[in-house]
């Protein structure tokens, strides 16, 4: 599947999952191939221009990603990745401020829950969940919001109560 020309690999955590981006660059032919989670999404053969950019999308929300190819000396190249118009580091730093991710296991099954703080969207194992936001009188003074994830419909009927700063996982067995 992946050829011997893979020159760069990045792992990108989005709300709907973690994506592995692999970039193959034939430095003599200009060939460019981009793989996302092992699937070929861009393929260009015999490019005369060895430097430049390749743009594609990742995730269920089609976030724009761009691989930048720059010559550093002779036939040496440097590769960088921009996500949503930002450098990879800026994107990761911004996501750390606007999302909270929990990874846990229930009855041997792995779960990845992501809370998007700015939209109050919740994702569980790549699927956007229906949520209800309720204000409780005991939290009003502190302007905190309690987010109830009612019936995630997980195998074990797990219900997650996500609070502004932490998460409790309550498991209800049949």
Image (cartoon, grey):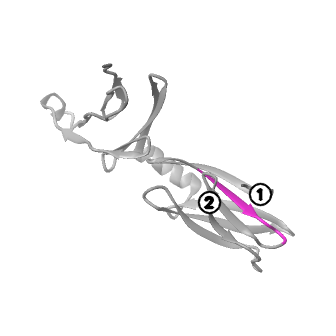
- Check disc 1 and report the residue beneath it: 3
Specify the farthest residue to the front: 174
Residue 24 counted in the magenta span? yes
- Left or right? Give the position of 6 relative to 35: right
- Check disc 2 and report the residue beneath it: 81
Closest to the observer, 169 or 126: 126
Across and down, in percent, residue 98 comes to 40, 47
**Among the two numbered marks 1 and 2 on one chain, the one whose residue lies closer to the N terminus:** 1
Badge 1 marks a residue whose secondary structure is loop
Number of labelled discs? 2
- Give the image quarter of residue 132: top left
Across and down, in percent, residue 89 comes to 57, 52
At 27% from the left and 33% from the top, the residue drawn is 151
Badge 2 marks a residue whose secondary structure is strand
User: Is residue 139 placed above or below 34 in the rendered structure?
Assistant: above
Specify the farthest residue to the right: 74
Residue 114 counted in the magenta span? no
- Left or right? Give the position of 136 relative to 87: left
């Amino acid at each position: 599947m992946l050829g011997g020309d893979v020159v760069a690999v990045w792992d990108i955590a989005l709300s709907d999952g973690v994506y592995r981006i692999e970039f193959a660059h034939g430095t003599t032919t200009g060939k460019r191939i981009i793989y996302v989670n092992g699937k070929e999404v861009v393929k260009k053969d015999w490019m005369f221009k060895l430097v430049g950019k390749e743009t594609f999308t990742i995730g269920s929300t089609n976030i724009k990603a761009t691989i930048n190819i720059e010559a550093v000396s002779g036939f040496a190249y440097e590769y960088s990745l921009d996500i949503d118009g930002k450098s990879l580091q800026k994107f990761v730093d911004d996501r750390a401020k606007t999302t909270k991710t929990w990874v846990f296991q229930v009855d041997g099954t792995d779960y990845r829950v992501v809370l998007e703080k700015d939209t109050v969207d919740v994702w569980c194992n790549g699927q956007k969940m229906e949520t209800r936001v309720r204000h409780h009188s005991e939290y009003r003074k502190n302007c905190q919001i309690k987010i109830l994830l009612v019936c995630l419909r997980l195998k074990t009927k797990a219900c997650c109560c996500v609070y502004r700063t932490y998460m409790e996982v309550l498991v209800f067995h049949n």
